[in-house]
Image (spheres, rainbow, N blue to C red):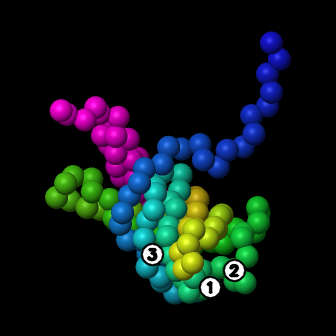
Amino acid sequence: MKTTAAKPNLRNQQRVDVSTEITIEKPDGECLTCSVANLSRSGVMISCTEETVKQLIPGRKVPAPGHWIPVKTRFAVPVLPTQPVSVIAEGSIVNMRRVARDEFHLGIQFAEFEGNGFDYLDRYVSKLLADSRKPAEA
């Protein structure tokens, strides 16, 4: 049987719905606060207003491959229930879509984590995925 080449998939990591704040730092140092819509080991989907999009994406044009917009993200994940830790990751805005009149979703692909950020994120996403697979108790 002949196989076909796999096409690149930007969504190769399972996503989990998360509701938390995230700080997006632009290359000029300006910081904006948005909401996380979902999270994976390789990126985050944020929810923001049109005004925030204007500040993050020049001309409000969807980023083209190779012309992604560099940003630094900061958000907290609970490693232990009583001990949230900060995850700081550099990445790029790679996607934008309008989901409502004044709500946009921006996809940020992570490139590099500071310290143990990836390990913290990996544990958090793994736990949420495991919890979502448990059958509900009657």
Three-letter amino acid code at the position of disc 2: Arg
Residue 27, given in percent of the width and then of the height, sits at 59, 80
- Quadrant occupied by the C terminus: top left
Among numbered discs 1 and 2, the one appearing first in the sequence: 1
Which residue extends farthest right? 2
User: Left or right of 122: which side holds 109?
Assistant: right
Left or right, 123 with respect to 10, comes to: left
* Camera sees residue 118: no
Image x and y of residue 135, in percent: 28, 32
As helix, strand or loop, the secondary structure at mark 3 comes to: strand
Amino acid residing under circle 1? Lys
Report the Cα–Cα distance between label 1 and label 3.
13 Å
Q: Point out residue 107 in the picture as x, y percentages from the top left corner.
A: 58, 63
Disc 3 marks which amino acid? Cys
Q: Distance between the residues labelled 2 and 3?
A: 17 Å
User: Residue farthest to the top?
Assistant: 1
Find residue 34 and name its label: 3
What kind of secondary structure does the magenta stretch mostly adopt? helix
Q: Does the CB distance between marks 2 and 3 fall below 8 Å?
A: no
CB of mark 1 within 8 Å of CB of mark 2? yes
Q: Mark 2 points at which residue?
A: 60
Residue appearing at x 42%, y 71% in the figure: 35
The part of the image, by quadrant, that contains residue 77 is bottom left
- Give the crowd class for mark 1: few <14, some 14-19, many >=20 residues within 10 Å: few
State which quarter of the image contains the N terminus: top right
Instruction: Answer few, some or many: residues within 10 Å of disc 3's Cα (few below 14, many 20 plus, some between 14 and 19).
Output: some
The number of numbered badges drawn on the structure is 3
Label 1 belongs to which residue?
54
Q: Which of marks 1 and 3 is nearer the N terminus?
A: 3
SS class, disc 2:
helix
Extent of the magenta region: 113-138
